[in-house]
Image (spheres, grey):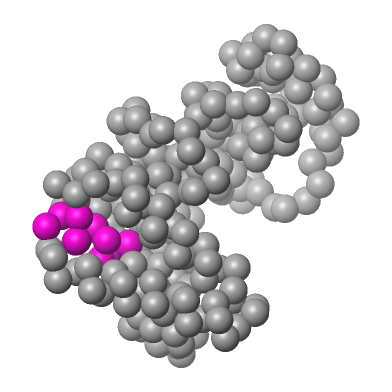
Amino acid sequence: MTQTTNPFEPLWPELSEIYLQSGTVSLIDHIGAKSEPRQRRGLFLMASQRISAGQDLPRTLADLIAISRAAIDEFAAQAEVESDAEERDRRIDGANILSYNLAADLAPCWPEDPEPRTVDHFRAGIRCAEDCLRWRSELNKGAVPFHMAWWALGTHRCGLADWSGAIVAFESSLEAARDHAKETASPIEVGPDASFLINIATGWLEFARWRGGDKTSYARFLQVISAFSEIAKRNDDDHADSMLGIQQLETAASRLPGS
């Protein structure tokens, strides 16, 4: 699934009207009734992206889950019946990307999204992240996609206060980040010279350990915040990513109490 202009963009006003007037179920039924598989993929993709981003639309997490799951299921179902191996992998990768995006949207660490997360949201996020790990294995993805999928799984384990499960996920996320660091000859330990991947994976790991009862991890958690702060001050190119890292970790700390 490449980042190109959606050929079905002219149909968005119609889809938007259905969504606003009749809701997500009617929108899903409308798209699902299209006979052409390519059109169903394009319309589900566009609808899930627009509703995720808001695009001046009122939406709830329930809306987002419904349309995103319909999109994921459409791509996965088409993959199952695709005889061409290359096209099948493209359909799987479409489901993989949509699944990751939903898991990320549901994560409890976005300061601009105050809608409370529930157990059902976290379970939906875990399902998405586990699907991502399976599909990324099938597609032989590299270290960075696995780092991201393990991160997503860990955040939702945190939401359920499953700190031991979160620690395992974040350890795997950090391991993948270190694999990538070795490939790029960059530092494998947290610090102002380390990559965003190393710092964010370490920050989440120490957060989960801290919330799980390891009081010594709090100092290491603050070390990550300090590293991001130093990067943000000295490097305009990395300022946005560094502030995102700080916001993620501080928002998680404010919303997710310990055991």
Q: Position of residue 22 (x, y in %)?
A: 67, 9
Toward the viewer: 114 or 31?
A: 114
Can you tell which quarter of the image residue 41 is in?
top right
Q: Position of residue 116 (x, y in %)?
A: 41, 33
Residue 173 drawn in magenta = no
Residue at image position (54%, 26%) is 60
Across and down, in percent, residue 214 comes to 12, 63
Instruction: Indicate whether 223 appears above or below 41.
Output: below
Q: Is residue 134 visible?
A: no
Where residue 125 sits, quadrant-wise, is: top left
Left or right side of 175 for 149: right
Left or right position of 221 against 39: left
**Above or below 96: residue 230:** below
Image coordinates of residue 113 in percent, x first then y, are: 52, 41
Pick the residue in front: 224 or 137. Answer: 224
Residue 208 belongs to the span the image colors magenta: yes
Q: Residue furthest bottom?
A: 185
Which residue lies at the image location 32% right of the left edge and 54% below the top edge? 253
244 or 119, which is in the foreground?
A: 244
Q: With 174 as the anchor, is 8 left or right in this view?
A: right
Is residue 241 shown above or below 95? below
**Position of 259 relative to 139 (above/below):** above
The magenta region covers 204-213
- Residue at 34% x, 40% y: name it: 126
Q: Residue at x 44, y 71 (%)?
A: 197
Can you see residue 257?
yes
> Is the stretch drawn in magenta largely helix, strand or loop?
helix
| 132 sits to left or right of 112 | left
Asked which quadrant contains residue 19, the reply is top right
